[in-house]
Structure formats: structure tokens, C-alpha cells
Amino acid sequence: MKLTEEEKLELEKVYQAFLNDERILKMQSIPMHRGSNCYIHSFKVAKRAVRYAERSRKKDINFHAILLGAILHDYYLYDWRSDRSKKKKHGHNHPQIASENAFRDFNISKEVRKIIESHMWPINIKEYPDSKEARIVSICDKAVTIKEASTSKAYKEKSKAYYLSYISKLFK
Ligand SMILES: [Fe+2]
Ligand SMILES: [Fe+2]
């Protein structure tokens, strides 16, 4: 679904506000997939999901919901690697925790909460992504995760500046 220049500007504004929000910046200290962090990961998913939706032939896509759902899908705010109590069930529990945190901090809609809660399907088999927006975020999260997991830690550390510049704008 094509976006007008005006719609793009509007989404870019929202994206920038999140990118510089101090609560969101906290995700930088949460490590992820071999040297990545939660902040970079989440904005990569957001960019990919919006691009994916732009290329989709489906009509009436809620880009705003995709953007928020993607940015906040891993807003669980703890390091499961250093917290043994959370380690075991992280894959299963973190979408619900992220959704609650996001609702508390950003008062997100039900639709966005559903996107966050179903992003780990089929690991959470009961949480099927039942909107096109939720399916897009779930697919793009998996694509970004696979790419991150298959890139070495050393490479990622070297390219941190590149990733930060890559996520610095939604459209470029
Ligand atoms: Fe996740
Ligand atoms: Fe993720």
C-alpha cells in the first residue's frame, strides 16, 4: 500500500519521537542476539515492517499500529541472560510483559497490544497474529532475528555506528 508524502512525514515524526524518548533509549542497555541490543533490533524491525507494508497489495493497512507495535514489541526491559528466573520462560512470557510495559508508558491501543502479544507466534501457539499488521510485525521480527543471530558478535560491534545511522531515519 503506497503512502503519500504527507503520511510518510507523519510516520517519520512518530518514529523520531520514539527514537529519542528516554524510556525507549533504555533498551540500548538490553543485550540481544549476539552483540545486538534491543533498541537497534526494535527499530530495525520497525523499518522493515513499514517497508514490507508499503510493498504489500493489501488495502487499509494501519501503518501507525505497525510502527508502534514494531518499536515496542520487545519493550520488556530486563536482561533475561543475567536473570535466571526469567531465562526459562523468556520466549513465552516477554510479549505479555512488553505489552503491559508499553501500555503503562505509552497508553497504546488494543490493536497495538495485540501486535506485541502475538509477535512470538508460533512459539506462543495460542497468540495467533490475527490482523495483517500483527502478521507483518511477526514476520519482520523473525527475519531481523535470523539475520542478527547469523552475524558474528565482533562484526556487530564493529558496525554499531553503521546500525545506529541505519535506524536514524524511518525513510531515507
Ligand atoms: Fe520478541
Ligand atoms: Fe524481536
Image: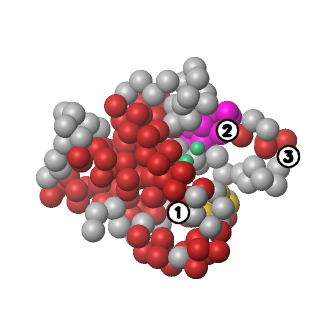
Q: Judge whether residue 170 is colored magenta.
A: no
Q: Which image quadrant for residue 171? A: bottom left
Q: Residue at x 73, y 54 (%)?
A: 79
Q: Which image quadrant for residue 155? A: bottom right
Within 8 Å: ligand 1 and the Cβ of disc 2?
Answer: yes
Q: Residue at x 49, y 53 (%)?
A: 144
Residue reaching furthest right? 84
**Foreground pick, 86 / 56:** 56
Q: Is residue 57 visible?
A: yes
Earlier along the polypeptide chain: callout 1 or callout 2? 1
- The stretch of residues the image draws in magenta is 92-104
SS type, badge 1: helix
**Above/below status of 55 relative to 59:** below
Q: Which residue lies under the disc numbered 3?
A: 84
What is the x, y in percent for residue 32? Answer: 65, 57
Q: Which residue is drawn at 24% across and 47% down?
A: 54
Within 8 Å: ligand 2 and the Cβ of disc 1?
Answer: no
Q: What residue type is labelled 2?
A: Gly
